[in-house]
Image (cartoon, rainbow, N blue to C red):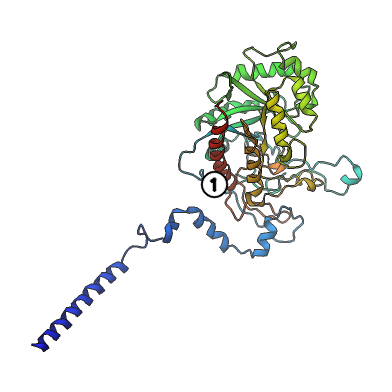
Amino acid sequence: MAKFRRRTCIILSLFILLIFSLMMGLKMLRPNKATFGDPFGLGLLPEVRQRTPHLEKNFDSQKNDKINSEINIKNLKSIDITVKPSIASEPYSEEQPSLNYNLHVFYYSWYGNPQFDGEYVHWNHPILKHWNPKISKNYPQGKHKPPDDIGSSFYPELGSYSSRDPSVIETHMKQIYSASIGVLALSWYPPNSHDENGESTDDLVPAILDKAHKYNLKVAFHIEPYYNRDDQSMYKNIKYIIDKYGNHPAFYRYKTKTGNALPMFYVYDSYITKPEQWANLLTVSGSQSIRNSPYDGLFIALLVEDKHKYDILQGGFDGIYTYFATNGFTYGSSYENWAKLKLFCDHFKLMFIPSVGPGYIDTSIRPWNAQNTRNRINGKYYETALRAALQTHPSVISITSFNEWHEGTQIEKAIPKRTSSTVYLDYRPHKPSLYLELTHKWSGIYSKERATYTLDQ
C-alpha cells in the first residue's frame, strides 16, 4: 500500500512538472511586440529611441564637445561632410496644444533662394565691418556663399529655404503651433521697401495670414526702421496695414482691461525717432493722432537704454519691449533691470513685455562681436530667461526669435552640418525640436501663473 502511494505521488509530480514546462514554453513564444514587453514603459518615450542613433555615429566624445561648442571652426582640412536637410518633421507632439496668445515670437520672412526668388537672399549676408578700421582689417571680408556657407552659426533643418515657399510657411506655422505660441510678430517693411540685405516682403503677408489661420495662430506686426520713418509715414502705413489686413481672422488684437480689442504694433528702434514726432501720432492732441480712431492700437517701443523710458512716455507709446536675447548687453535686455522697468510701467500704466531668447551668436556676420555671444547651455540659458520674465508678472512675453538665424536666436529646428570650412552649431545631444519643446513647456507654466495675477485675458 505504501509503495502504491509513493508511485502515485511520483506520477502526480511528473504531471505537474509537465504542465509547468508547457506553460513556460508558451510564454517564450509570446511576440516581441507584446504590449508589456518594454520595461517601465520605455516604448512610450520616442525621444529615447530617436536619440540612440546619435551614439552610433563615428564621432568620439571629444569631437562631439568641439562640435557643440559655440565657435565656428574655419579652414578645416577634412573632407566635406554634409548632413543633408531632412524632410521637415511633424510637430513633436501629437496632442492638441493649448495656444497661449500672450506669448509672442518674432518672425522673419526675408529669406530667399534661387528656386523661388532667383537668387539667395539673406543667407548670403555680408560680413559686416567693424566701425574701427584697425579692428576691421583683422577679420574676413565679403559675403557668404550658400547653400553650404550661410550667414549663420547654425544650419536650418529646412536648409537655405525661401520664405516664399508655401511648404516652408506651412512648416513654420506647424512648429510655432507645436510650441504653444499663439502670436507671431512679423517683421514688416512697407510695400516696395526692405532692409539693406533683402527684398520687399509685404506681398507675402496674405499667405502668412492664411497659413497662420489654419493653425489658429494670430499675426502682429513688427514695424522695422524703414527709410524716412516718421509720424506722417507711420500714420499712412498703420492705415495701410489695418485697411488691407485688419479684417483677416488671423489679424491679432489684444483685449485691454477696458474691453477694447486693439491691434498691437512692435516698433523696432523706436528711439531713433524723436519723441515729439511720436507724440504727433500717439497722443490724443497730436497733429497726426490715431487715438480714438479706427486706426488706434497698442504701440510698443523698444527700450535699449534706461533713459529711453522717459522718451517712450513722452512719445505716447502704450508699452515697452526689450528685444535683445543677450542678458547684460543693454539696460533693457538685462534681467536684473526688469523688476524696475515693470514698476515704472505699472506706475504710468504701460505694458511691460520682456523679450527672452535661447542664446545669441552673430559672429558669422559680425566676427568681431564674440564678447556678446551667449551660450545656449543645452536650453538652460533659455529657461533662465523665461523664469526671470515670469517673475515680473508680465501681460505678454515676447520670444527673440523664431528664425533670426544671423544672430543665432532662433528656436526653429536646426541640424548638424559640417563642411570643409565650417562646423555649424546644433542642439545635440537633444533633438532639433528642443527649443520648441521647451517653449511648449513654459507656455503652459506661463498660462497658469498669468491666470493668478491678471484678469485682462
On-image quarter of the C terminus: top right
Residue 175 in sight here: no
Q: Position of residue 289 (x, y in %)?
A: 71, 13
* Foreground of the two, 50 or 40: 40
Q: Position of residue 217 (x, y in %)?
A: 54, 31
On-image quarter of the N terminus: bottom left
Q: Label 1's element?
A: loop
* Foreground of the two, 78 or 449: 449
* Foreground of the two, 40 or 435: 40
Residue behind mark 1: 87
Q: Amino acid at mark 1?
A: Ile
- Looking at the image, the residue that sits furthest to the right is 134
- How many numbered discs, if any? 1
What residue is at 62 percent from the left and 31 percent from the top?
A: 396
Residue 5 falls left or right of residue 75: left
What residue is at 64 percent from the left and 54 percent from the top?
A: 82
Q: Position of residue 154 (x, y in %)?
A: 67, 48
